[in-house]
Amino acid sequence: MTEPGGRNEELTRAFMAAEGTRQILAVLVPVRIAADPPWPKGPLPVAHPDAAAEEAARRGLFTASAGRALYDRRWHTRPDPAPQQGPMRLDGMELLRTPTSRSPRQGLAVLHFTVAGAPLLPLLRAVSRRRQPIDPDPLSGPFAPAALLAGAADTATPAGPFALSRPYTVAFLTPPDHLTRVMRAGDTADVPLDADLLLRALASRGSPSDLPPAPEALARIRSQVSRISADWSALVLRQGAAFLGHRRDTGPGDFYDRALANARGTYLDALLLGTAQRDHIDELTDDLSSVFGATGLARRSADLERRIAVFRSTYWRQHLSAHGPANNLLLDFHTRHQLPARFEQILTEAADYARLAQNQESQQIAGALGVLTILGLPLSTALSVLQVLGDTSAADLTIALAASLAATAAALTTRYGRLVLSSLRGGPR
């Protein structure tokens, strides 16, 4: 444990009191969307005056399939006047449909907040429920997702196999003059370690005292940070992501205007796509684990292969565009959730189940042919003998049929007959 007055506690006090010049918070909430909401179509405008121009600009940066997944079924609204609760102001909301085979109404809601007049980290800790009992949940009262999205989406906890217990958060903070511990000392100086530790705190929604970093893990923590440019960095973790500036923010007209638009726009879109991919892979993983829990292996295997093909063509993209930062953020999200390895395992298991179903079908077909042989050979032999003898007597025909049935029954008791019957029973049911 960290002793009182140790570095982790000193960092915690500093980070819990750190108030940025710009503080933005986006909250991603899983929802169900029964019908198209009465909102304008397209993403929330953050760099252009209207949604159509915003959507066109973002589509130009992404591949066609990623653009369809991110923008074809998306809506936004910007409340006027913007409601406020404490230091938080609601700037806008978005809904994105991300249907799966099991949950055709599944979607994601994005709540965009600006935080002013208070430090950002305590609010993030409260969202993750790392808070003192007296601290309120920021997503309560008028800012409760159920209240904000009433009439547009259902925020009841989804029944997904691996649904997150708390919303995913994306934080953005630029330093004021006095927050020098996260700034570069000069254009050629390295980013200080404290900057990456603050990034980790914002992304993990926990202070250094909540999640004390081991000294030997510091190099790994720093290697996970994505340097977007000399001015700012990003970190993507399982429960959240964060963007942090490394020089003083001079206010309106500064480069951070553009940085903020990117963080709320294309970079957030990369995380939205990663979240949708994770949900689909979670569902496929759960369905693969129960493939033998019901009858009809061939049918279930074929259905899984079809769903995997649809997912690959619709959502599974590891590269959004030729632009590096959005790709890097998506790849970081993949790494944190081990999505490529999990999807490769899904493909391997599905191929194994398909081969097993094909083998069972082949065995069933071979068994059916064997039954036809066992049934048909005695009967055809008896009828051929009668035809050669020219015997058309009904009594003789009845005797021949009885003899052929007796021969068939005897053949089914042999090792070959038992093997044929076993093949039929082993087929898909």
Image (cartoon, rainbow, N blue to C red):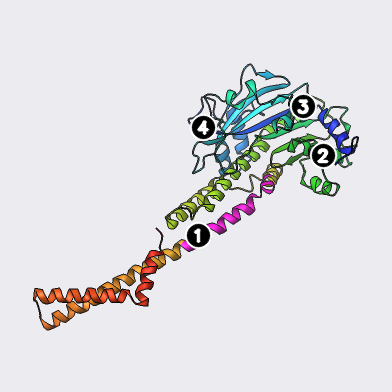
Gap in angstroms between the C-alphas marked 4 and 2: 38 Å
Gap in angstroms between the C-alphas marked 2 and 3: 19 Å
Q: Residue furthest top?
A: 81
Can you say which quadrant of the picture contains the N terminus?
Answer: top right
Mark with earlier residue (2, 3): 3
> Which amino acid type corresponds to the residue marked 2 in the rendered image?
Leu
Q: Quadrant of residue 126?
A: top right
Residue 363 percent coordinates (x, y): 41, 68
Q: Which residues are magenta?
A: 333-356
Q: Is mark 4 in CB contact (under 8 Å) with mark 3?
A: no
Q: Nearer the viewer, mark 4 or mark 1?
A: 1
Picture disc at residue 197 = 2
> Which amino acid type corresponds to the residue marked 3 in the rendered image?
Arg
Mark with earlier residue (3, 1): 3
Circle 4 residue: 33
Q: Quadrant of residue 424?
A: bottom left
